[in-house]
Amino acid sequence: MPEERLQKILAHAGVTSRRKAEELITAGRVSVNGETITELGSKADLSIDKVKVDGRVLSEPKHHLYIALNKPKNCVTTVHDPQGRQTVMSFFKGLHERIYPVGRLDYSSEGLLLLTNDGEFANRLTSPAHHVTKTYLVKSNGPLTREQEEEFRTGIPMHGRRTAPAGLKLIRKGENPWYEVRLVEGRQNQIRIMFKHFGRLVEKLKRVKIGFLDLGDLKPGAYRTLTRAEVARFQKQLHFDDNKAGRQ
């Protein structure tokens, strides 16, 4: 097996996404053959080198898992939380394989969340380059004007960079209307910040779709394994080569 970059090795071993793996490396939490590695360009060969994360030896997952969870409100989308809050991993205590969340939903948000131990799948799914649309239902504390709706769709300034074009549709009128929002990027708290830009607060936020995959009738806290057909459809959208496709 040829040498590969450490962040790719960590992702393929199901530790975390490639982006988060970079943070683990620079934080000094990764070692190769007993030597702590902090440089992102470092490489290793998992078949002959002993790679550890936080003292735990890595190995390739026996098979890949792809799981859809209906994340409830008031839990965080992380593997561990330094503040001691409930994390989405609390719903998988009986699962022997090590998985991690793909992307995020903030503490107060709910809905569809994917988890996997396939690092390349997670990396591609969260990359804006693959244009995987996420669909949300959003309850606001007041309506947007037509001008504000159009600005929402074309993009607003956020942390020094404009948001990508977004979909916005009013689906229920009222003093506290509901909107359908579609994004191809997933910047932290993006929807809440976008509504706040127009003087509105988000009262409820629920992700109901990732790409073609619907939340369906999953109850909060419940999860299911994606079917082979669903995994294959994602792999086609994410441009996996046939010989590199993830395994179930």
Image (cartoon, rainbow, N blue to C red):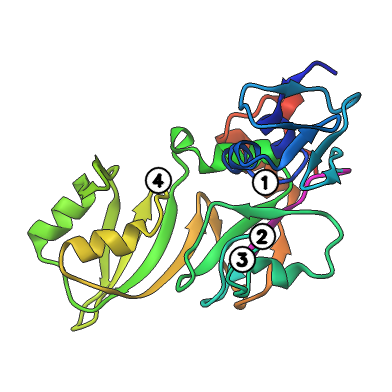
* Residue at image location 39% in from the left, 50% down from the top: 187
**Amino acid identity at mark 1:** Thr
Mark linked to residue 16: 1
Q: Position of residue 101 (x, y in %)?
A: 63, 55
The crowd level at tag 3 (other Cα within 10 Å; few <14, some 14-19, many 20+) is: few
Q: Decide: marks 3, 4 in contact (CB < 8 A)?
A: no
Q: Decide: marks 1, 2 in contact (CB < 8 A)?
A: yes
Mark linked to residue 185: 4
The crowd level at tag 1 (other Cα within 10 Å; few <14, some 14-19, many 20+) is: many
Please name whichever residue, 117 or 238, is drawn nearer the observer in this view of the structure: 117
The residues colored magenta run 62-69
* Residue at image location 42% in from the left, 58% down from the top: 135
Specify which label sits upstream in the sequence, 4 or 1. Answer: 1
Q: CA distance from mark 2 to mark 4?
A: 22 Å
Drawn side of residue 193 relative to residue 119, left or right: left
Residue to which mark 2 is pinned: 79
Mark linked to residue 81: 3
Residue furthest bottom in the image: 175
Mark 1, secondary structure of its residue: loop
Mark 2, secondary structure of its residue: loop
